[in-house]
Amino acid sequence: MESANTASSGSDQRPQKRLRTPCQPYEPPSNDSLSLEEERMLAQAIANSRNDKGREPLTAIPFGPTFYPTVEEFSGDPLLYLEKIRSVAEKYGEFCFSILSVSARLCHQKKFQTKDQSIHRLQEGISFGDGDDYTVKEYQKMSSDWSKEWKNKHYSAPDETNRQAESSISGSLGNAASVNKIPASPLSSTAAAAPSSDLAKEEKLGEIGTPKKMTPENLERDYWDIVETGRQDIDVDYGNDVDTSEFGSGFPISERGRSVNSPGFQTGQSNEEIPEPSFGTEEYYKETFWNLNNIPNSKNSVLRHLKVGIHGINVPWLYFGCLFSTFCWHNEDNYMYSINYHHKGAPKQWYGVPGTKQDADGVERVFKNYLSMKMRDVPDLLHHITTSFSPRLLNKEGVRVCKLLQHAGEFIVTFPRAFHGGFSLGPNCGEAVNFALHDWIPHAVDANERYRTFARPSVFSHDRLVYTMAHHINELRTKKICKSLAQELRRLMQEEMLLRKKLINAGVRDVSKDVELPPNRLDQLDEESADYDDKRLCHSCKHICFFSAVCCECSDSKVSCLRHSHYMCRCSIKRKYILVWTPESEMKETISKVEKRGEELSDDSKPATLTSNVSSFHNGALEDAAGASKDRLIHQSYEVEVGPIIDSVPELVSSDTSVCSSRSSSTLKDPPETGASTVPNPTISASPNVLQIKDAAAGNQDLHM
């Protein structure tokens, strides 16, 4: 919606003309008349204007691929399927796929908070203010009214003839869900009511004089024009990070202890010995690990060791979006994987960057170049998730980037360290959560070191989680996992022993033989363990001191990690002492067990993978994924819905299912021809370290790999 401070076009009276005064040559203001802050802002603006001359078309940004799992694969663990397609998907950083039609049952009476986003100022890195509070119904009405306002002002509504054409085209591509309906080409459209002025008429017409449609491509252009030029003041309320434990989840709750909110979750009684329910049954949608409440606790997810609920990590968050509401560039906490499901409503436009160090560093370089002044004051600006730069700007600066369009019923998966962002094209409701495979360990190390640099507390102890993994030997399935884990444990041990020796030699007392400390729990990370970890945060870098800590006689509560004991206080080193929870002998024994487990495993334990013509996802420019021509067609011609979704969002949790593909093997191929099967065909698509899953029956993807 437009800001109340913004005058609507043509509504204000023009001031009386005044006599033209002679132009005076420009003279830069003296240093005395400009404050230091103003000088810095002027220099930054001039530098940015030089860097941003000429904008390449957004159509130059490549689309990621889509994948088509089978019923058998949907009946299994999604994390095993992810490992299977990794060689293709990881190149893009994100990917998309769709399988479920879940009826999101939410609490309609409670109000949730929103953030007030100034879309025209997203490049400035400013913090978001508080928006209004809404019930689900109130937000959807507001969001729908705002979309209709934008459509009426900038676009023409299709007439009945155009709707019939939409139906014809949609039918030619399969039995699509209504949300994925593909409209007719603008060439066949007829004008709606004539605009009241030539200017408005020109705005609502396309290049060849036909009515302009509110398509994803046109809205994408509108959005980035607002962000990059600031010619319109647009403020929207975004309902992000809404607590599913309070407002309900769009997925049903497991009765086998597979989600944080399940009975028996804390005790670990997950009833794994009971056979998996049949695909498509009501019980399946409760118990499948494709359910976002369950996926963090898959037996192949490292986060299953967390027996405490952490909102947004292993407890999903809900997201209520409206036209142009934005999820700014960011990567996940601790560089974890994430999965986002789109329940209902208008599509979301996603952008993704591969999770390589080169590409991630490239995103940070762009931020530093364009917001150098801001980042001097706020070095951890990227962690605030308040800044958006156009993907073409990243592309221009040598950062690989791709895009995806996520419709209702589709998932987006992001890979570790992969930057991603985007915006909504209208009223919608989504849900997201994190998970982590064992290959995430090297990324977790990088994230942990970065957090210590910025003194940012981690959502959980990296050292504890890695050490807990090592005490679940039978869950380590491959030599590669064992090698990676043993390598990290050895690194931690070497740093511990080196710093312990250095501090003791400097005069710090070792009281480990005199003080009996409560042992670290190693079977799981529960509420009690998390509370204990919160009490041993390093005073300087906020690292959780899991193996050992330095304390001083001057404080009963302040502790320090071994790296930063000299920052803790000014007391003599003789007053400081070391507390040790994990002795060297225990660490060596743990490493030995992990290495022995690796020796026992054969290379055959690796899952089968799909082949790809990509030699290495670390190198080479990104190109349109195979079959992306159909994505581009949808992007150019699909007319975005503007109605509220509240009528299709009943109250509190249940599952309404639809059936997926019945194909017998996992392929990345064209969806079947219309009429070939009465069963809708699920698909998955990918972008730089962001994965998308779509419905093949809707004709969203035509993929060959």
Image (tube, helix red, strand yellow):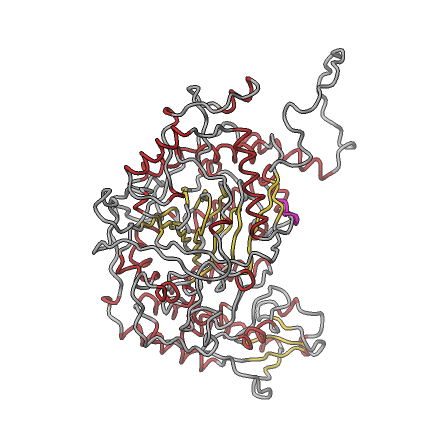
Quarter of the figure with residue 14: top right
The residue sitting at 30% across, 46% down in the picture is: 696
**Residue 249 seen anywhere in this rendered image of the structure:** yes
In the displayed structure, would residue 44 be above or below residue 111? above
Question: Which residue is rendered at x = 59% and y = 82% of the image?
Answer: 510
Q: Is residue 494 visible?
A: no
- Report how many numbered discs are placed on residues in the image: 0
| Residue 500 screen position, x and y as percent | 54, 75
Residue 239 screen position, x and y as percent? 57, 51
For the point 51% across and 73% down, which residue is it?
Answer: 496
Q: In this view, does 619 lie above or below 255?
A: above
Q: Does the magenta stretch include residue 621?
A: no
Taken as a whole, is the magenta stretch helix, strand or loop? loop
User: Toward which corner of the image does residue 442 lie, by quadrant?
Assistant: bottom left
Which residue shows up at 42% across the image and 65% down it?
294
| 127 within the magenta span | yes
The quarter of the rendered structure image containing the N terminus is: top right
Q: Which of 77 and 144 is in front in this view?
A: 144
User: Most extreme residue toward the right, as rendered?
Assistant: 32
From the top left corner, tell me how far across and down residue 310 is, in percent. 53, 66
Q: Which residues are the magenta region?
A: 125-130
Q: Where is residue 591 in the image (x, y as percent from the top left)?
A: 39, 76
